[in-house]
Amino acid sequence: MNNPVDLSKYNNDWYKKEIGASRLKQMVWYCINVLFFISPILPGSGIKRFFLRAFGAKVGEGVVLKPSINIKYPWKLTIGDHSWIGERVWIDNLALVEIGKNVCVSQGALLLTGNHDFTRMDFDLIVKKIVLEDGVWIGAKAMVCPGVICESHAVLAAGSIATQNLESYKIYQGNPAICVKERMVSE
């Protein structure tokens, strides 16, 4: 039999004080995100880079931002030079997400910085930053979980889920993702 849960003990305090922006800024960003990022109508990256920078993101040169991407909080986002964010990518960044140079985050990938502590009655929110170092490739419909560091040139294969750090120059696959082979990179 299930234990009854007292929902009055749910702790939502983190959300109220750790967002890092005023309610007005959050609301304006929400509208811009819907109109210019989530919408598939605007294909160009230039206006998207402008809006991300205007809302506090650190965005390098030559960053490609494809249509239909969803970014929760740009003020908690860094994207290095010549990185690529594919269609339908969701950056659910309750905590900082750092994307290095020459990174590819493929179509439908999810970068998830938050989760809940299911062992506690108050279901506390747990947030941890994600780091994708230079040269990382996150495959289509793959997921990177809170607190994961993908070291230089690591690959997370399509549909895989990274629950632990990925080592440099290794290819990971599965759920949970495990190392399946070395990544060989030619000049």
Image (tube, rainbow, N blue to C red):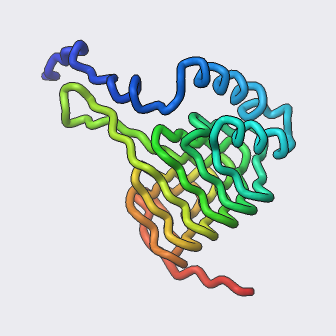
Q: Quadrant of the C terminus?
A: bottom right
Q: Nearer the viewer, residue 34 or 179?
A: 34
127 to 2, vertically: above or below: below
How many dots with numbers?
Answer: 0
Spot occupied by residue 42 in the image (x, y as percentages of width and height): 85, 35
Give the residue drawn at x 86%, y 43%.
Answer: 44
99 to 71, vertically: above or below: below
Say whether residue 44 is left or right of residue 117.
right
Say whether residue 32 is left or right of residue 110.
right
Q: Hey, which quadrant is residue 75 in on the image?
A: top right
Q: Nearer the viewer, residue 181 or 127?
A: 127
Q: Hey, which quadrant is residue 73 in on the image?
A: top right
Spot occupied by residue 11 in the image (x, y as percentages of width and height): 28, 23
Give the residue drawn at x 66%, y 35%.
Answer: 55
Spot occupied by residue 98 in the image (x, y as percentages of width and height): 55, 55
Q: Nearer the viewer, residue 128 or 177?
A: 128
Give the residue drawn at x 58%, y 46%.
Answer: 77
Give the residue drawn at x 61%, y 69%.
Answer: 134
Say whether residue 153 is left or right of residue 94.
right
17 to 185, vertically: above or below: above
Say whether residue 44 is left or right of residue 168.
right
Q: Quadrant of the N terminus?
A: top left
